[in-house]
Amino acid sequence: MTHKNKKSIFRIILGLMFFALFISKCWTIYVEGLKIKPSDGLFFIVFGLAGIVHTMEGMGYPIEKLFKKAKRKKDE
């Protein structure tokens, strides 16, 4: 499965929305002085990574290329 380096406005916006939810949750916990629960940690991981991945892929940088480069270096 190959990706062409196409840019996608939808993926960029989707990634930024995920990242905005991540930031707003962090800010809410910080401002209200709440303790971080395990479910919050899961939320941070999922939404933070989803925001980064969608934004990168929307800009035309496929995530598979990063893993292929790391695998090639490991195999050598």
Image: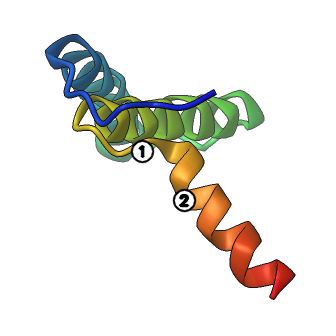
Q: Residues within 10 Å of mark 2 (few under 14, many from 20)?
A: few
Residue at left 45%, top 37%? 53
Residue at image x 36%, y 23%? 18
Residue 67 image offset from top left, x and y in percent = 65, 57
Q: Residue at x 47, y 39 (%)?
A: 48
Query: What colour-coding does the image apply?
Result: rainbow
The outermost residue toward the top is 10
Report the disc number at residue 62.
none
Q: Locate the C terminus and report the quarter of the image it occupies.
A: bottom right
Q: Which one is closest to the eye, mark 2 or mark 1?
A: 2
Image quadrant occupied by the N terminus:
top right
Which dot marks residue 66? 2
List x then y, in percent, for residue 25: 39, 30
SS for tag 1? loop
Q: The residue tagged with tag 2: helix, strand or loop? A: helix
For label 1, the residue is 33
* Residue 29, quarter of the rendered image: top left
**Front residue of this view, candidates 74 and 40:** 74
